[in-house]
Image (spheres, rainbow, N blue to C red):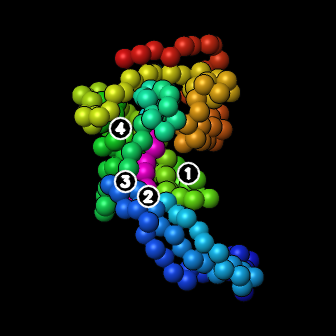
C-alpha cells in the first residue's frame, strides 16, 4: 500500500441534492481510512480556465466586475467555465476575447490547481496569453465588465495591499511574478499605475 492509498476515502453511495446550470451538489457516504463512515457534501463544477494575458507593453489584462456572492466589485484575471467536451486552449482563447476583446495568437498552459478542494471539485487551468489582437468584447448579457491594463509590479502591489482578493487571480499573479517574471523583462522597476481601456 502506498502513502496515497492509506489516505483515500472510498465512496459507498452518492445522492444528488441539487442539480443546476453551473454546479451540482451531491452527498457522498464514504468509508474513511480507519474504517469509519461519514458524509461528504461535494459541489460539482465542470472546471474553468484562467488567463494571464500580456499586451505588447507587458501589461497584464485584468477585469473588474461585481460578484454577488462576495457582494463587492473584484479585480480578477479573465476566466470562465469549460463547456462539456471543450478543449482547454480553445476555452481560454474564447473567454479572453469574450471578457476583454483581446484574442491571443500565442498561448501557453502554466499550471492546474483546485479552487476549494475541501468541498468542491472545480479544477482551474492557468494560461499565459501573448501576442494579443484587439477585437470586440462579447460578454454575456448579464455581465458588466471593466477592462484594466496594469504592470506586473503594480498588480503585485495590489495583492500585497489586499485590494485583489480573488484567489485564482492571486495565484496567477504570484505564479507569474515568481516563476516567469523574475526571469524576464516583465517586471519593471519604476512605479507605473494601471490604465483603463
Q: Quadrant of the N terminus?
A: bottom right
The reply, left or right, for residue 160 in relation to residue 48 is right
Q: Quadrant of the C terminus?
A: top left
Tell me the tag on residue 45: 2
Which residue does the image show at 42% across and 28% down from the upper left?
65
Tell me if mark 1 has few (under 14), some (14-19) or many (20+) residues whose alpha carbon lies within 10 angstroms of its own: some
Question: Real-space Cα distance between discs 2 and 1?
Answer: 10 Å
Which residue does the image show at 41% across and 56% down from the upper left?
23
Mark 3 and mark 2 in contact (Cβ < 8 Å)?
yes
Magenta part of the chain: 45-51
- Per the image, label 2 sits on a secondary structure element best described as loop
Ranked by sequence position, the earlier of labels 3 and 1 is 3
Q: Is residue 5 above or below residue 112?
A: below
Residue 78 seen anywhere in this rendered image of the structure: yes
- Tell me residue 38's x, y (percent): 65, 75
Tell me if mark 3 has few (under 14), some (14-19) or many (20+) residues whose alpha carbon lies within 10 angstroms of its own: few
Q: Which residue is mark 3?
A: 22
Question: Real-space Cα distance between discs 2 and 4?
Answer: 20 Å
Amino acid at each position: 500500500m502506498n502513502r496515497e492509498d492509506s489516505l483515500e476515502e472510498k465512496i459507498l453511495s452518492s445522492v444528488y441534492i441539487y442539480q443546476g446550470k453551473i454546479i451540482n451538489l451531491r452527498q457522498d457516504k464514504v468509508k474513511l481510512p480507519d474504517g469509519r463512515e461519514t458524509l461528504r457534501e461535494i459541489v460539482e463544477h465542470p472546471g474553468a480556465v484562467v488567463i494571464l494575458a500580456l499586451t505588447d507593453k507587458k501589461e497584464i489584462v485584468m477585469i473588474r466586475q461585481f460578484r454577488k456572492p462576495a457582494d463587492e466589485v473584484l479585480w480578477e484575471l479573465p476566466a470562465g467555465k469549460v463547456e462539456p467536451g471543450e478543449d482547454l486552449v480553445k476555452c481560454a482563447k474564447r473567454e479572453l476575447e469574450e471578457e476583454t476583446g483581446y484574442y491571443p495568437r500565442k498561448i501557453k498552459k502554466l499550471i492546474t490547481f483546485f479552487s476549494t478542494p475541501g468541498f468542491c471539485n472545480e479544477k482551474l487551468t492557468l494560461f499565459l496569453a501573448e501576442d494579443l489582437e484587439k477585437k470586440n468584447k462579447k460578454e454575456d448579457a448579464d455581465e458588466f465588465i471593466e477592462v484594466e491594463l496594469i504592470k506586473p509590479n503594480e498588480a503585485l502591489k495590489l495583492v500585497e495591499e489586499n485590494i485583489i482578493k480573488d484567489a485564482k487571480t492571486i495565484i496567477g499573479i504570484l505564479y507569474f511574478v515568481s516563476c516567469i517574471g523574475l526571469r524576464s523583462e516583465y517586471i519593471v522597476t519604476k512605479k507605473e499605475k494601471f490604465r483603463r481601456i
